[in-house]
Image (cartoon, rainbow, N blue to C red):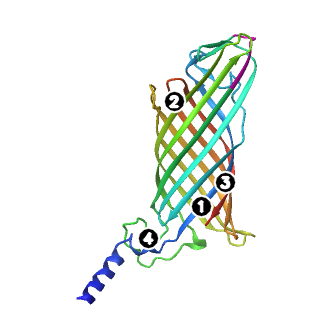
Amino acid sequence: MDAAAAALSANLLATDPAGPAQADAPFKLVLDLEAWAPRLEGNFEDGSGPDGDKVDVRTPDLHDMELVLTGALTARRGRLGVGIRGFSFSTSGGGTADDAFTLADVGVGAGDAFDSSFSWWSAGAEVRYDLYTPLAERAYAWSEPRAGWKPSANGTELPVFVLVAADIGSIERTIVNRTTGASSDASEAFVTLMAGAGFELSFDAGAVPFVERVTVGARAEAGLAVPPGDGDLGGAARVEASIAARFRCGTSAYFGYRFLGVSLDGDEVDLDGSLQGLRAGVSFEF
């Protein structure tokens, strides 16, 4: 009876793709430390400007590129990854208005002196699953092993993954008319819920000095922006692309681009805008 049970167990492990493959997969932590240089783009839609019932972020001088330090910590095992991420962005402006505009009932006339500021912070979590691995022994987790499979030349891998993410965020905007003394300080908290997909193409660098592996990847997410107050549902999107070089010491350096957009119809702030810009960072694997 024991021999039969052992044989049955061995057969189940051999046919269950989540069995030995997942059990033998190493657990690892990846820490990303990054410098991101985005600009605020888009329109405030709770005011009026020279173009109608919206105010371009350039009008109150909130379009400067700013350096943002961001971070992420991801736990990976096999096809599954779970991570946390966050950033804090702020910019300020001011000067003399070329055209009249209004934000949050604060009117700024042509020729008026004004000060402005804007901030956006976000923190959240993401779950990723490598759904399709066309160059691996098993294309899907539930697939049978491929007969006669051999690893690709140069260790090439191409996982295609799906992901879901939830982030909490807050936007704050101030406007001060220094000529009249009128001012406003408005803020809005919100939650974004997104789903998406992406890919990573990686391969051994071969004869490149000091570089062990190169990875090129991209991802896109889309979903909802949910203000907890009296606002309406809006949209949210996140797009990233990068190229990374892993050095023989186990540390990686990467360079890429990030777009983070939101259409927020809040109680105090209406923004149809985005943060977008180049990014560069290092990854430490434990």
Question: What is the quadrant of residue 209 in the picture?
Answer: bottom right
State the residue position of label 1. Answer: 30
Q: Residue 278 appears in which quarter of the rendering?
A: top right
Quick check: 136 above or below 108?
below
Question: Distance of mark 1 from mark 3, alpha carbons?
Answer: 10 Å
The C terminus lies in quadrant: bottom right
Q: Position of residue 273 (x, y in %)?
A: 58, 31
Kind of residue at badge 4: Gln
Residue type pointed to by label 2: Leu
Q: Earlier in the sequence, mark 1 or mark 4?
A: 4
Q: Earlier in the sequence, mark 2 or mark 1?
A: 1
Q: In the image, 232: left or right of 91?
A: left
- The Cα–Cα distance between marks 2 and 1, rounded to whole angstroms, is 32 Å
Residue 163: assigned label: none
**Is the C-beta separation of discs 4 and 2 under 8 Å?**
no
Q: Residues within 10 Å of mark 4 (few under 14, many from 20)?
A: some
Residue 33 tag number: 3
Answer with the quarter of the image where residue 113 lies.
top right
- Foreground pick, 43 / 81: 81
**Label 2 belongs to which residue?**
264
- Give the CA separation, mark 4 to mark 2: 41 Å
